[in-house]
Amino acid sequence: MIVPFNKLPEESRVWIYQSNRVFTVGELDFIKENANDFLNNWTAHGAKLQAAIDIPYDRFLVIALNESLQSASGCSIDSSVRFIQNLEKKLGVILLDKMNVTYRIRNKIEYISLKDFRKMVKKKLLNSNVIVFNNLVINKKEYNSLWEVPAINSWHARYF
């Protein structure tokens, strides 16, 4: 069952999917409609899951789940991945490729391959203070405080 994102507890689990591009207004409507349908019917072992969606910067898709009520099962996680795969197919975007980095520089969000990110760091085109999106955060509390951070404060630090 879908609830407003801000109503979920801080311990709620999150999954973050970054898009290779900004969504159009029509695509945002499509995503919201399909996410509402999916989340309202999302279950684990027959029990409804309390979940929410957030779409920051019109290019990330964040699914949050209140695991204090019901944890996700392997099958429910698989169904969420199928939901994301379907969005990729219908919208012609990349959401599941974890070998890409999204960062913000001069208020512009960039999406590049990890390989190219490493090259830019090596050439000193990016420094350790560049704001990166750490999509490895595990809960809403981390999402709110550790998702957008200087690279030096995330897993990206290994490249500096």
Image (cartoon, rainbow, N blue to C red):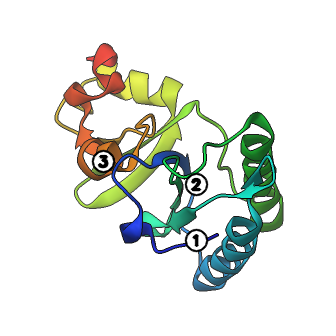
Q: Would you say 35 lies left or right of 146 here? A: right
Q: Secondary structure at mark 1?
A: loop
Among the two numbered marks 3 and 1 on one chain, the one whose residue lies closer to the N terminus = 1
- The answer to whether the residue labelled 3 contacts the one labelled 2, judged by CB atoms less than 8 Å apart, is no
Residue type at mark 2 is Ser
Q: Secondary structure at mark 2?
A: loop
In this view, the residue in front, 109 or 28, is 28
Reply above or below: 159 against 15.
above
* Dot 2 crowding, Cα within 10 Å, few <14, some 14–19, many 20+: many
Residue that label 3 marks: 141
Q: Which mark is residue 19?
A: 2
Q: CA distance from mark 3 to mark 1?
A: 25 Å
| Residue drawn at (70%, 71%) of the image | 40
Q: CA distance from mark 1 to mark 2?
A: 8 Å
Task: Measuring from the top left, give residue 70's x and y in whole percent.
Answer: 60, 49
In this view, the residue in front, 87 or 78, is 78
Task: Measuring from the top left, give residue 3's x and y in whole percent.
Answer: 52, 73
- The answer to whether the residue labelled 1 contacts the one labelled 2, judged by CB atoms less than 8 Å apart, is yes
Q: Which mark is residue 23?
A: 1
| Residue drawn at (35%, 23%) of the image | 155
Reply above or below: 82 against 59.
above
Residue type at mark 3 is Lys
Q: Quadrant of residue 160?
A: top left
| Residue drawn at (54%, 65%) of the image | 53
Q: CA distance from mark 3 to mark 2?
A: 22 Å
